[in-house]
Amino acid sequence: MEKHVLILATTHDFLLKFERENVEILQSMGYTVHFAANLREPGYLSDEEAIRERGVVLHHIDIARSPYLVRENQRALRQLLEILRRWDMRALHCHTPVGGLLGRLAGKLSPLHPVVVYTAHGFHFYRGAPLFNRLVYYPVERELARYTDLLLVINQEDEQAARRLPLAPGGKVFRLPGVGLNRQVFSPPDPEERQRIRRRYGVAPGEFLLVSLGELNVNKNHQVVLEALSLLQRRNRLSGVRYVICGEGFARERLQREIQERELPVSLWGFRRDVPQILTCADATVFPSRREGLGMAGLESLAMGVPVLAADNRGTREYMVFGKNGLIYPWNDPSGFARGILLLQGLDPVRRRELSQRCRESVAPFDRTLTRETMRLVYEEMDRKRRERLAQMSGGLRGAGVL
């Protein structure tokens, strides 16, 4: 019997960003891998051809990022149920908040009773979250847990919360070391090559380059860095500093307007595929998110030997140690970020090399080989549950005289 599994997310760029290794594992286990997402989001990028080249069957659904777009998400739920029915889908791995919501509802409503795997890339009811999050998101997650066979989390805080949730009978919680850090791709070049790359990207000799990677939205919190740079500018301490933000999102126009009004040395470079080269140019990265499940951008920077100036959140707490591989401040502390910029800019060459080495060493627990080992265990458990459930359903049909 042919085996089909569906990976579900909100936007179609998710698969190649985070699921390459998982696709390979599933295919090696004999599965035909399907991927359902909104193929029109994000609008500035199309990965459809590259996804199909990996042997993945693509499905467009009208899933929306916001759970409050009820009409679109109801339509997406109906589309999901039809995909499950048409392909006799007995296993489903869902991601992203809305993907997790619709995927688990589809698993409950489908007469096929597929095994449901959900990766929580960061619960919204985290410690310190707004009261609204705890009052709304926690009850929803608790109810959906009843339809979750395997729940995957990526940080200690979420693991503790996950183990208190009432999963489906026989359900299990797994903790992943992130989606897998490729330390062959994210590895620093020799000093001469680094200087060549900096020249190619227009970085001036002696310039202290700060880089942020991530979607342009409120949560990524680039605002605090602009405020920190303004503080340094008023104190005449901004000489030689340049800040580059890589990413796209709805906050772009507001950020661009504020950069111009404040007359800051900041550039928006948009969505980029050359992240290792950009990190090669950086002297430090800034990772100021209010909330992160883990934060691959921070890990990738550290793997390149580039220190991180981070906001304190449950994700960065997994790998950031103040003074060891960078600096950490509250997400709403522009004065702290300003101090951090000056501290990193003022490092002498010896201390900078020592810091760079510690950065690289700190990411070893997040190597993709460890993630791959855990995901193979997850999928083996998923496959075992699929076979067990299929046998139970077949036995029930025989007992009823249908087979």
Image (cartoon, rainbow, N blue to C red):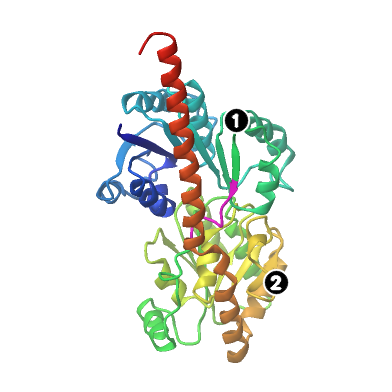
Q: Is residue 280 visible?
A: yes
Q: Position of residue 108 (x, y in %)?
A: 51, 24
Would you call the spot at circle 1 few (<14 residues within 10 Å), some (14-19), or many (20 or more)? some
Answer with left or right where residue 234 lies relative to residue 40: right
* Residue wearing tag 1: 168
Residue at (50, 82) in percent of width and height: 207
Q: Position of residue 319 (x, y in %)?
A: 63, 65
Q: Dot 1 lies on which element? A: loop
Residue 396 belongs to magenta span: no
Q: Is residue 111 visible?
A: no
Answer with left or right where residue 163 lies relative to residue 304: right
In the image, residue 114 sits, relative to residue 394, either above or below, namely below
Question: Mark 1 or mark 2: which is in front?
Answer: 1
In which image quadrant can residue 342 be found? Answer: bottom right
In which image quadrant can residue 237 be found? Answer: bottom right
Residue 175 belongs to magenta span: yes
Q: Position of residue 85 (x, y in %)?
A: 36, 23
> Which label is found at residue 322?
2
